[in-house]
């Protein structure tokens, strides 16, 4: 019996590794096929994924997270994942991080045209950004700790849970052209997965000779989310699906493109 258990576990482990490799390949192909623009300016696809995730509680699913930048600032993010069980489809889950409109082609065809993806708001009560990069990093971590994100169960509005903020930013950036002295993207995830559900952008922005902290929030799921900062509700976005066609609208800042792929 013991040898059978070991053998069966080994086969299952090998199958999981093969599925993960296949998902990585498919995600790379999909990301490469996406071309994003802000006006006439083409965004830069950052070819290395920020995160690689799986969620064994939901099933056999593997995903990679990519971003597209302009002048160093992230303007769009996509979680590209492949189901193997209980579903078999592949999906590309996009969220605009832009303060203006974006357009996108997929395999050469227009697939997305949306307005503002998020709004960067002033943190008027935050301390002034430090002149020292290391100290600014500490400031960003301290500010991020003030945010608490919660998700609402899709079928039971009375059931909510706190999302886990990953301890380190998933992306750090600067943009002299955009007046961003320093910036970081934090991810809030469900349980122990690395699958981002809510995104928090923190930026030290220079305007009129003054540098101040700003924040912006974006979704990476169709659930209802609420975010509090220091106990105050600052963000409340509704559940988008079901009905599922609501997340397939190419004029919205959050878009899911579902496709079939061979296992």
Image (spheres, rainbow, N blue to C red):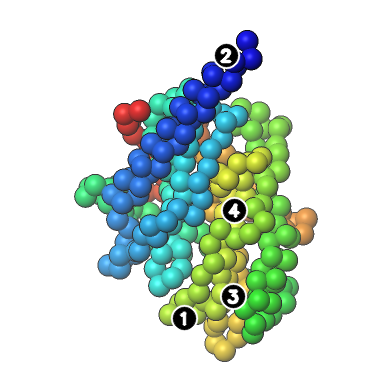
**CA–CA distance between discs 1 and 2?**
61 Å
Residue behind mark 3: 204
- Give the quarter of the figure containing the C terminus: top left
Sequence order check, earlier mark of 3 and 1: 1
Question: In the image, 57: left or right of 38?
Answer: right
**CA–CA distance between discs 3 and 1?**
11 Å
Q: Position of residue 51 (x, y in %)?
A: 51, 50
Question: In the image, 32: left or right of 254?
Answer: left
Residue 4 marker:
2
**CA–CA distance between discs 2 and 3?**
58 Å
Residue 187 marker:
4
Sequence order check, earlier mark of 2 and 4: 2
- Furthest residue toward left: 108
Q: Position of residue 167 (x, y in %)?
A: 67, 56
Sequence order check, earlier mark of 1 and 2: 2
Residue 176 marker:
1
Sequence order check, earlier mark of 4 and 3: 4
């Amino acid at each position: 019996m013991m040898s059978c258990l070991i053998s069966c576990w080994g086969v299952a482990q090998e199958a999981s590794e093969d599925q993960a490799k296949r998902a990585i390949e498919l995600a790379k192909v999909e990301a490469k096929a996406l071309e994003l623009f802000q006006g006439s300016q083409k965004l830069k696809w950052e070819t290395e994924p920020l995160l690689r995730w799986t969620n064994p509680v939901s099933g056999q699913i593997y995903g990679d997270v990519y971003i597209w930048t302009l002048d160093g600032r992230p303007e769009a993010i996509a979680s590209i994942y492949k189901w193997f069980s209980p579903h078999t489809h592949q999906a590309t889950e996009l969220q605009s991080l832009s303060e203006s409109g974006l357009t996108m082609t997929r395999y050469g065809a227009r697939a997305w045209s949306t307005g503002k993806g998020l709004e960067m708001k002033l943190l008027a009560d935050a301390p002034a950004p430090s002149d020292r990069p290391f100290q600014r990093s500490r400031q960003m971590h301290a500010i991020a700790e003030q945010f608490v994100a919660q998700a609402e169960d899709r079928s039971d509005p009375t059931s909510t849970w706190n999302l886990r903020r990953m301890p380190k930013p998933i992306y750090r950036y600067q943009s002299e052209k955009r007046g961003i002295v320093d910036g970081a993207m934090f991810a809030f995830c469900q349980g122990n997965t690395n699958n981002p559900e809510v995104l928090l952008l923190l930026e030290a922005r220079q305007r009129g000779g003054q540098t101040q902290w700003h924040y912006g929030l974006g979704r990476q799921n169709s659930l209802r989310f609420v975010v509090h900062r220091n106990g105050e509700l600052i963000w409340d976005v509704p559940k988008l699906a079901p009905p599922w066609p609501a997340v397939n609208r190419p004029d919205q800042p959050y878009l899911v493109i579902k496709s079939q792929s061979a296992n």
